[in-house]
Image: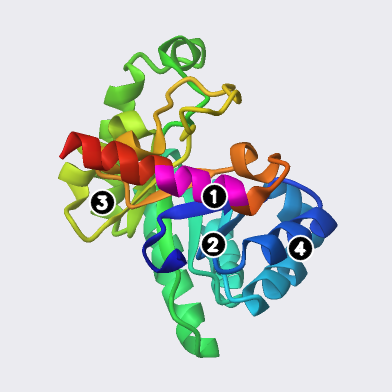
Amino acid sequence: MHAHNPIIVALDCDAAEALELAHSLRGRVAWLKVGMTLYYARGPEIVAHLSELGFGIFVDLKLHDIPHQVAGAAAEIAKLGVGMFTVHASGGREMMRVAVESSRRAAEEVGVPAPAVLAVTVLTSIGDADLAEVGVTLRAADQVALLGRLAREAGVDGVVCSPREAALMREVFGEEALIVTPGVRPAWSEVSDQARIATPAAALAAGASHLVIGRPITSAQHPARAVDRVVSEIEVELAEWR
């Protein structure tokens, strides 16, 4: 099933639960996301275990520091053989540029494919009022546009943005770029702690290449069935819109 499945399942849990979920999702999805909670607990070890199960790994640490520090961190992540990792676009053009350069060089040194570097624009939990509180006068959509264009100039492979900005980012980056959208909630999901969300089908129709979905799948009684339900919802909605 997973050959054309755009879902990235977010494993925001401990290692034991992550491995149990991974085993239950084999054959259902191609990608798993390792975020801060899991990575800070088990680091490269958990990435290796999940990779051995055949998944592509998206390491979502949102690197944001001086360029020298980010270059070093990006190199170490690349050596793990992951498929994607994130940096914060707000770290600036040079920081993003060195993340790309360092990760590609490190991957080549150890003989693994270079990971895609994704720039996080504005977190999906943040709205216009939240940006104003920290001194950003632009609306969220305009801030995403500004950071997305900067990220493209820095040479990253794509962005992480909310579904609401996916169409704009697709326009900025072109057809080959990765547009990864968290803030994706199936129509039947009761989880709603993010400000800028959309259904899976709506995110894909807007230009997303991958959908990050966590608790609607991982907290389900049967995670594999929840994946099937999401896939069915996507197929039905997209068919209706055609």
Q: Which residue sits at x=53%, y=24%?
A: 194
Amino acid under label 1? Val
Identify the main secondary structure in magenta: helix
| Label 3 vs 4, first from the N-terminus | 4
Residue 174: horizontal and vertical position, in percent?
Answer: 17, 53
Q: Which mark is residue 28?
A: 2
Mark 3 residue crowding within 10 angstroms, few (<14) / some (14–19) / many (20+): many
> What secondary structure is found at the residue carrying circle 1?
helix
Q: Residue at x 49, y 32 (%)?
A: 185
Q: Which residues are magenta?
A: 225-232
Callouts 1 and 2 close, C-beta under 8 Å: yes
The quadrant holding residue 117 is bottom left
- The answer to whether marks 3 and 4 mark residues whose Cβ atoms lie closer than 8 Å is no
Q: Nearer the viewer, residue 112 or 154?
A: 112
Q: Is residue 123 one of those drawn in magenta?
A: no
Does residue 50 show up? yes
Secondary structure category for the residue under label 4: helix
Could you say which disc has been placed on residue 19 in the image?
4
Please state which amino acid type lies under the numbered disc 4: Leu
Question: Residue 190's spot in the image, x, y percent?
Answer: 60, 23
Q: Nearer the viewer, mark 1 or mark 4?
A: 1
